[in-house]
Image: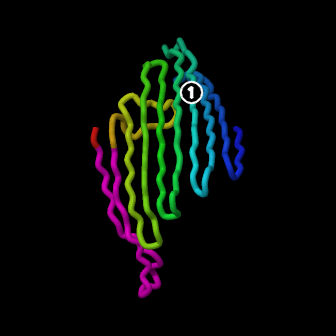
Amino acid sequence: RFTQRTEKYGLAGLFTRQGETANSSTSNFGVLRYLRNYGRENNVGVMLTHRLDAENPALELASNNNTTLTIDGQIRPTSELDIQYLFSTSIDEQSGNTGFAGRISAGNSTNKYYVGWVTEYTDEAYNPGMGFVRQNNVIRHNPGGYYIWRPKKFDWIRRWDPGVFFNFTHD
C-alpha cells in the first residue's frame, strides 16, 4: 500500500494477492488512484484497477484479466453549488466486453434548504472485477430536496429536514 497527499494532489496505490483455495484460483488485485485539486474547491481524479485471476485447471477456470478506468471530479462554482461526476469503463478479457457507467449530480445547499439531482447510468456490459454493480443496463434518476427547519420553540428539536426525493429508473 502506498499513499501520498499534499494540498495540490493525492496519490495512492494498493496491491493484494489472494491465494488459491479449494473453490477459487489465485487472484491479484491492483488499484492506482491520482487526484488533483485545482481552483478553490475543485478536483479531478483518475483511478485504474486491474484484477488478474490465474488459471486453475482442476476447477476448470481459465485465466482472466479485468480492468477499469475511472475519471471523477467535483466542481464548486460557489460555496452553495456542488457538481460531481464519475465516468468509468470496464474491459473484461474472458467475455470480450467493454462496458460503461457514469454518475453526475448537482446540488444547491444553503443553511435553509437543499435541492439536487442525481443521474446514474450503467450499461449492460459494465463489469468491474473488483466491487459490485447494483444493476446493469439501467438509467436511474434521483431528484429531490429538503427544507432545513430549526425551531426556536422546541428545545428538544435542534434541526429537522423534511423533504422529498424521487427514484425512477428506466432501461
Horizontally, residue 66 falls left or right of residue 16, namely left
Color scheme of the displayed model: rainbow
Q: Is residue 99 above or below residue 115?
A: above
Q: Is residue 169 left or right of residue 134?
A: left
Q: Is residue 36 left or right of residue 161?
A: right
Q: Quadrant of residue 100?
A: top left
Outermost residue toward the bottom?
153
**Looking at the figure, which quarter contains the N terminus?**
top right
Name the residue nearer the viewer: 78 or 91: 78
Residue at far top of view: 57
- Identified at 51% across, 62% down, the residue is 78
Residue 107 image point, x, y percent:
43, 58
Identify the residue at image location x=71%, y=39%: 2
Verify whether residue 53 appears in magenta.
Answer: no
Residue 92 place in picture, x, y as percent: 48, 23
Q: Quick check: 108 left or right of 139? A: right
| Numbered-mark total | 1
Pointer 1 residue: 51
